[in-house]
Image: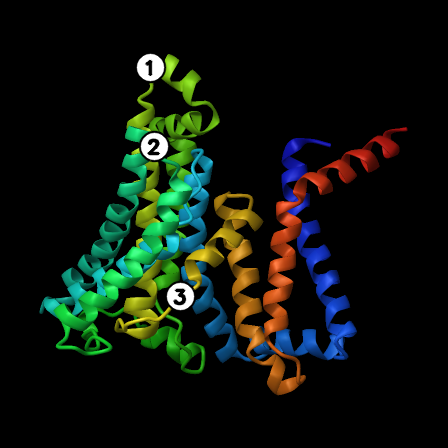
Amino acid sequence: MSERLKNFIVPILAVILGMLAGTIIIIATGYNAGQAFYALWDGAFGDIYYTGETIRQVTPYILAGLAVGFAYKTGLFNIGVEGQLIVGWLAAVWVGVAFDLPKVIHLPLAILAAAAAGALWAFIPGYLKARFHVHEVIVTIMLNYVALHITNYFIRYVITDNGDRTPDIPETASLRSPFFENITDYSRLHWGIVVAILCVILMWFILEKTTRGYELRAVGFNQHASEYAGMSVRSNIILSMVISGAFAGLAGSMEALGTFGYAATRSGFTGIGFDGIAVALLGANTPIGIVLAALLLGSLKVGALNMPLEAGVPNELVDIIIALIVFFVAASYMIRILIDRFSKKGVK
């Protein structure tokens, strides 16, 4: 069996095994698994409103997955997507409330500000990795907490006067779409899904169709060989983290300019950045795989809200199913061994 076919089959098997394990847990805890999964599907796609909400949830997941996947494709593990998303969220709202501009300028400026903020936040671990060989996992984890508390400070003492949330952004900086709202029975679906799809194409184009993308992937495969070939390992590490952070910042702008329209102080993380890790792993860090994984995770998250209402099943069980799916993805080595054994038996 070819390696490409294995990369396609392994995530599918991981999802199936995760669902089976989740079914066993649902039955073992005394709930009806059939009703639970029907309620899950009904809550995600049973009504046009829920479908709109599912696509809205998928939007930041795609961008967070791209952020993790892009870094991983170039040999880096960006666990700081959550922090980069938060600073991107704040930057988008700040541009939204601070300027009075025509929409054709205001909205792109707010989106670009979010991307720039995320990129700047990711530049720090990228520079430390390239210059001093400080492991990016440690730095990005710590910067998540720094981002959380710094943005809380800015919201409370800079943008507002001891307030817990910023003013709402004006219409000129909003991603809201009356068209999408009307066709989805007034869900919160917005133009951000178009931005997310464009970024999927952009990631594919950079990595597969440009010289710089080839260098980035080469550095990820083998830094010493890349340096011997005349590539700048340091600059490529920094660039990889900056692009990854830009995707994360864009994920924050989707929530800031599309779903909520404001920024508020937080006692904890949004969770989107950490879910982006699961999306990237499940999608094998490929653009199309990330879209499909984001669709799965988004539908599970939105559909779970309907489970207590329709089936009396705690929606926390969906988090368990997601965790099991990620576990089987992480244990893909075992799945590959099983595939190889069955393939050899089939040949005999």
- The amino acid sitting under disc 1 is Gly
- The amino acid sitting under disc 3 is Thr
- Tag count: 3
The label number, if any, that marks residue 237 in the structure image: 2
Q: Tag 3: Cα neighbours inside 10 Å, few (<14), some, or many (≥20)? A: some
Disc 1 or 2, which lies upstream in sequence? 1
Give the residue pinned by disc 1: 230
Do labels 1 and 2 touch, CB within 8 Å? Answer: no
Give the residue pinned by disc 3: 270
Disc 1 or 3, which lies upstream in sequence? 1
Depth check, front residue: 104 or 87: 87
* Residue 120 placement (x, y as % from top left): 24, 46
In the picture shown, does residue 299 fall above or below 4? below
Give the SS element for disc 1. Answer: loop
Give the SS element for disc 3. Answer: loop
Image depth: mark 1 or mark 2 in front: 2
